[in-house]
Amino acid sequence: MPSLQLPRYSPILLPVKETFATSSHKVSGSAIRPIEFNLVIESPPLICYGSRTQSTGALLSGLLFLYVNAYAIPMKNVTLELVQEITVKRPSIGACKDCIHHVNILHRWDLLKHHTTLPRSEYGYPFSHLLHGDLPASTSSSLAGVSYYLRAAATPLAKDVTPITLTRALPVYRSIITTDVRRCLRVFPPTSLNVTAALPAVAFPKSTFMMDLQLNNINNKDKKTRWQLRKLSWHLDEITRLKHTGCDKHHDSPQQLEDIKSIAFSDIRKGWKTDFSNDGRIEAEVEISTLDDVPMSCNVLVPELGFEVEHILVVEMLVSEENIPMNGSRQSNPTGAARILRMQFSVEITERGGLGISWDDEVPPTYDDVPISPPGYDYIVPTYDIEHLVM
């Protein structure tokens, strides 16, 4: 059993809310707590850097403090659990508690396994665990939510001492750090129009990013017509899917749910550049903003539960056809033809990485990483004779 003694009023101790029933011990009208818990997280925020297949996870470490305020209390056990809980917010009719709350114990520490009498003192139990990189990040969407927490429990043998439980939430994030730019091509048959788009590989909640659009081949020299851009609109949608199978007793009635929510949208009627030389092109730079007060989640995938959150950027370009002016005239006549060029782009919404680095990048260099040492002094270069100075 790892055990160490620490000062009672150490400055690193942080107040943590304990949950326990009312004790029967009272002095001067106030309840006495024979045993208390405190929890200190020493590791940095739990951020999994990279995708589910590339991330090395996040390292969790901390100290659990047990304060015995009575003279001596016989204890049955002291445990600490790292719990993942997935909550279904739209369960099927007749769903039970197990259908709504899917609890998975990721790790368990048996800090005190045998019956032991603990004298009045302070006890500290260090713990650490490596969270796998494929774990979904903490999220709360319209259909389901994923949360993590630490749960400590102490069970005394004495019947007059109430067991205590401590719960501390552990937010888990995922951050994909990259500066790559995605370049996409969309074609629109039977016309010769095509659109090239450039946008960042990842985006962040409550932020803005730029998207470059270029509409090519707007001139039709055979028909002596050209296309003009009249309006450009976009909207960012958050799509949440859940394939709820229920618990072992209610798995016979699975349900497939899908919820689509618009995060942001905008209409643009001017601000692009048009070039009618050669095949012709139209260039536009669009600012995509998610700064509105609309709650949004990052991309999440839980394959074992069929839970997924993704984001789709939908762009629509309204173009109309007109005749090419002849004999130097600037007046063009519309032909009456118009089209809506609709495109969809998948957007990876991830948390900001900040200045943090992955836990495996903090490992000190090994012996093989030490560079070649400077040259030795086995070979001495001879010097030339120097005249003696006579004073």
Image (spheres, rainbow, N blue to C red):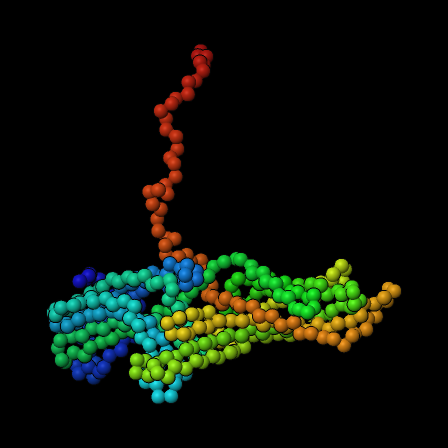
94 and 68: which one is in front?
94
Q: Is residue 103 visible?
A: yes
Q: Is residue 391 left or right of residue 284?
A: left
Q: Is residue 199 left or right of residue 251?
A: right
Residue 262, position as x, y percentages in the image: 54, 77
Quadrant the N terminus occupies: bottom left
Q: Is residue 213 visible?
A: no
191 and 290: which one is in front?
191
Residue located 39% across and 39% down the image: 371
Q: Is residue 177 left or right of residue 27?
A: right
Query: In this rendering, is residue 203 above or below 93?
Result: above
Residue located 52% across and 65% down the image: 203
Q: Is residue 134 left or right of residue 312?
A: left
Residue located 37% across and 79% down the image: 245
146 and 239: which one is in front?
239
Residue located 36% across and 54% down the image: 360
User: Number of marks in the image?
Assistant: 0
Query: In this rendering, is residue 62 above or below 154?
Result: above
Residue 76, position as x, y percentages in the image: 15, 72
372 and 14: which one is in front?
372
Quadrant the C terminus occupies: top left
Farthest-out residue, right = 327
Residue 296, position as x, y percentages in the image: 48, 74
